[in-house]
Image (spheres, rainbow, N blue to C red):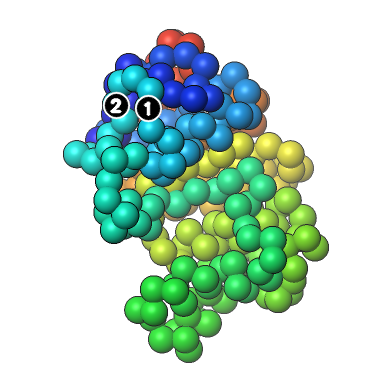
């Protein structure tokens, strides 16, 4: 269970108070992009609440030990608005960095898994392209592929369906929902532009400012 209990934090405009059962999907409607940034920093443990508490299960991310927060972040996938890629690494390096660093999968197997993940995400460009040459849509495809490699239990989508064409938006939403329905995955969709989530069916919708609906 993910619990926001009477939270006030830097960048969050109003007190947050809601609970999301594991395996559910939630749309969080915010007032501005910087509030989405604060939400994701809170979830990943980079931001501690000024008041209240935030828990994933029994854990409060901001107060975990380094080894514990590393494990929690490994179980959390994030599709950032810009893809969240490291600019001085190429596409392939961004995609395989975590698996290569953890050294639990042989290099030959990493190559096979990474190619399969890119195919699943629908990416068909150069594997060694620089980040600067990727479109916004392609960056998000790579971010999805990276998530497919590590198979997180919690997925956070930060304005993922904004700034792309309707066809690209449909492709990205299909990836998100196929992954959500493929297991006991909890999915949180953050946006300050509700129109980008039009037509999606969530278990829970929360409007920053206090309004919520099941």
| Relative height, residue 129 to residue 121 (above, below) | below
Question: Could you tell me if the residues under marks 2 and 1 are in contact, i.e. CB atoms within 8 Å?
Answer: yes
Q: Secondary structure at mark 2?
A: strand
Image coordinates of residue 153 in percent, x first then y, are: 34, 51
The residue where tag 2 is placed is 53
Residue 84 visible in the displayed image: yes
Q: Which residue is rendered at x = 50% and y = 48% of the image?
A: 78
The residue lying toward the viewer, choosing from 22 and 91, is 91
Please give the name of the residue rendered at 48% of the width and 89% of the height, measured from the top-left corner: 108
How far, Cα to Cα, is label 2 from label 1?
6 Å
Q: 97 or 137, which lies in front?
A: 97
Q: Residue furthest left?
A: 58
Image quarter in which the C terminus is found: top left
**Residue 194: assigned label:** none
Along the horizontal axis of the image, is 180 left or right of 134?
A: left
The quadrant in which the N terminus is found is top left
Task: Name the side, left or right, on which 3 lies relative to 197.
Answer: left
Image point 58% across, 46% down: which residue? 80
Numbered mark located on residue 49 in the image: 1
Residue at position x 39%, y 73% from top? 102
User: Residue 16 appears at what percent x and percent y?
Assistant: 39, 19
Residue 67, picture quadrant: bottom left
Mark 1 residue element: loop
Q: Position of residue 175 (x, y in %)?
A: 54, 52
Relative placement, left or right, of 53 versus 94 is: left
Q: Pick the residue in front: 178 or 91.
A: 91
Q: Is residue 41 above or below residue 127?
A: above
- Neighbor class of circle 1 (other Cα within 10 Å; few <14, some 14-19, many 20+) is some
Task: Name, please, the residue furthest toward the top.
Answer: 210
Q: How crowded is the residue under tag 2: few (<14 C-alpha within 10 Å), some, or many (20+)? A: some
Task: Note whether residue 174 is visible.
Answer: no
Q: Is residue 18 above or below residue 83?
A: above
């Amino acid at each position: 269970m993910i619990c926001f209990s009477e939270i006030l934090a830097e960048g969050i405009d109003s007190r947050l108070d809601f609970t999301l059962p594991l395996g559910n999907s939630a749309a969080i409607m915010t007032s501005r992009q910087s509030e989405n940034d604060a939400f994701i920093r809170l979830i990943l443990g980079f931001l501690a609440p000024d008041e209240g508490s935030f828990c994933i299960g029994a854990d409060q991310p901001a107060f975990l030990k380094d080894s514990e927060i590393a494990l929690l972040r490994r179980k959390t996938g994030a599709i950032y608005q810009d893809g969240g890629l490291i600019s001085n690494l190429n596409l392939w390096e961004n995609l395989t960095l975590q698996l290569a660093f953890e050294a639990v999968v042989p290099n030959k197997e990493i190559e096979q898994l990474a190619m399969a993940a890119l195919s699943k995400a629908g990416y068909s460009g150069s594997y060694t392209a620089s980040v600067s040459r990727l479109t916004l849509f392609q960056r998000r495809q790579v971010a999805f592929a990276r998530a497919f490699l590590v198979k997180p239990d919690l997925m956070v989508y930060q304005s993922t369906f904004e700034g792309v064409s309707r066809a690209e938006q449909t492709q990205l939403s299909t990836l998100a929902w196929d992954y959500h329905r493929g297991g006991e995955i909890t999915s949180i969709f953050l946006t300050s532009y509700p129109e980008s989530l039009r037509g999606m069916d969530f278990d829970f919708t929360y409007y920053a400012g206090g309004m919520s609906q099941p």
